[in-house]
Image (cartoon, grey):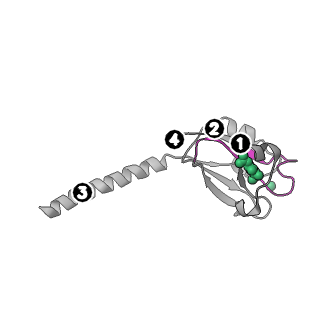
Amino acid sequence: MAFNHIVVVSTILVALLLSNTSVAIESTQYVVGDSSGWTIDYDYIAWAKSKVFRVGDTLVFNYPKGIHNVFKVNGTAFANCIIPPPSEAYTSGHDIIALSAPGKTYFLCGVEEHCSEFNQKLAIYVRAS
Ligand SMILES: *[C@@H]1O[C@H](CO)[C@@H](O)[C@H](O)[C@H]1NC(C)=O
Ligand SMILES: [Cu+2]
C-alpha cells in the first residue's frame, strides 16, 4: 500500500517535471544577425524590429573567435559605445546569452571601433515571459 503511494507520488512528480520541461522548450533561441552573425556594418535595428523577445529566450552571437566579442551593457554605454572591463566580455565566438530580465537590453562589440564606427551594437526590448 505504501509502495502504491510511492508510485503515485513519483508519477505525479515526473509529470510535473515533464510539464516544466515543455514550458522551457517554448522559449526561443535567436541567432543574432541570422547567417551574417555578429559583425560590423550590419543593421541590427532592422534585425530586431519584427521580433518579440521574452524573458527566458536566448540570443546566440556567432563570430570568428578573436575578431569580435560581446558585452552586455547599460543604456549609457550603448549610446556612447563605452566598453566595459575586458573581464565582462563574452569571447567564445558562439556566445549563448539568456535574457534574464524584462526591459531594454543592450549589447555591443568591444573590439577597436566596431561599436562607434561600424555600428556593431544591438538594442532589444525584453518582455516579461
Ligand atoms: C554603465 O556602464 C558603464 C560601462 O561599464 C559604467 O561605467 C557606468 O557606471 C554604468 N552606468 C550605470 C548607470 O550603471
Ligand atoms: Cu566587433
Label 1 CA crowd tier, 10 Å (few <14, some 14–19, many 20+): many
- Quarter for ligand 2? bottom right
User: Where in the figure is residue 2, as x and y percent of width and height?
Assistant: 14, 62
Q: Is residue 27 magenta?
A: no
Q: Label 2 is placed on what type of residue?
A: Lys
Q: Label 4 is placed on what type of residue?
A: Ser
- CA gap, disc 2 to disc 3? 41 Å
Q: Earlier in the sequence, mark 2 or mark 3?
A: 3
Label 2 CA crowd tier, 10 Å (few <14, some 14–19, many 20+): few
Q: Number of marks in the image? A: 4
Q: Is residue 36 visible?
A: no
Which range is magenta?
A: 101-122
User: Where in the figure is residue 72, as x and y percent of width and height?
Assistant: 69, 52
Disc ID at residue 51: 2
Instruction: Please give the residue where the numbered disc 1 appears in the rendered image.
Output: 123
Front position in the image: 112 or 62:
112
Disc ID at residue 129: 4
- CA gap, disc 2 to disc 4? 14 Å
- CA gap, disc 1 to disc 3? 46 Å
Q: Nearer the viewer, mark 2 or mark 3?
A: 3
Label 3 CA crowd tier, 10 Å (few <14, some 14–19, many 20+): few
Per the image, label 1 sits on a secondary structure element best described as strand
Front position in the image: 20 or 106:
106
Q: Nearer the viewer, mark 2 or mark 4?
A: 4
Does the beta carbon of the residue at mark 2 sit less than 8 Å from ligand 2? no
Front position in the image: 82 or 112:
82
Q: Residue at x 34, y 52 (%)?
A: 16
Disc ID at residue 9: 3
> Quick check: marks 2 and 4 in contact, CB under 8 Å?
no
Left or right of 82? Residue 2 is: left
Per the image, label 2 sits on a secondary structure element best described as loop
